[in-house]
Image (spheres, rainbow, N blue to C red):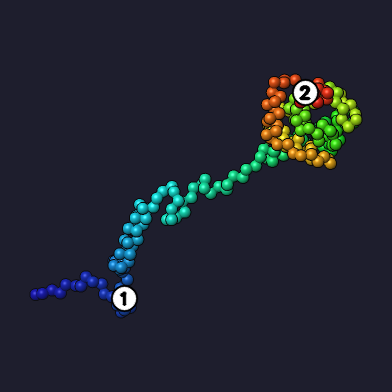
Amino acid sequence: MNQHKPDDTPAQSPQRQRELPDPDEGVRPLPWFLTMFLGAMAMWGAFYIYSTPSGEESSYGDQRTTASLRPPAVAVNAAQKADGKQIYGAKCAACHQATGLGIPGVFPPLAGSEWVVGDEKILTSIMLLGVNGEMEVKGTVYKGAMPAWKSLSDGDLAAVMSYIRSDWGNKSAEIEPGSVAAQREATKSRTEPYKGGQELKSGV
């Protein structure tokens, strides 16, 4: 006698039978033309990298170096680089004052001084070696000591002398660093300050 085996599959309700199966994402290969396009781009990129020269100007792209991007240097002489007014304020104003009028009877004025607006060689020698002794400035005799500033560069000395020759009503020509260098060379054998105005006039 055949016996009926029960069905192992659970019975589905009418509601579940109406449900569609869950979607399943299968494998969808790229279209052949897109694959060929990507391959061609990769080959072109490899050829571009291989054929592009390195480190030199090229029409393949912007290969400028840092040095080529720097602006061209502008030639500026040492007197223009240095700030004569600033140097004067730091080195000279304590004695000759910011007004250039000095201190009566103690420190001579620079405004209208014949030593400032006159021979630039004499003024440069004063700056390089200093002066100890009597000096007549604008009709007044001063007895003091002017320190030497030979430790300053040619450019700094030229800048500060050009400043005092053009301020406070003074209208003398600027002094170039080359002139300072020449006078420094001419007086290099001297190691002591000038002994007053008379020696200055006769020794320069």
Where residue 40 appears, as percent x and y from the top left, is: 32, 61
Q: Nearer the viewer, mark 2 or mark 1?
A: 2
Evaluate whether residue 13 shows in this view: no
Label 1 environment density (alpha carbons within 10 Å; few <14, some 14–19, many ≥20)? few
Q: Position of 41 compared to 151: left or right?
A: left
Per the image, label 2 sits on a secondary structure element best described as helix
Q: Position of 139 compared to 40: left or right?
A: right
Above/below status of 20 relative to 123: below
Amino acid type of disc 1?
A: Leu
Separation of disc 2 and disc 1 at Cα?
118 Å
Above/below status of 198 relative to 18: above
Where residue 100 appears, as percent x and y from the top left, is: 83, 36
Which residue is farthest left? 1
* Residue 4 circle label: none
Which quarter of the rendering shows the N terminus? bottom left
| Residue topped by disc 2 | 203
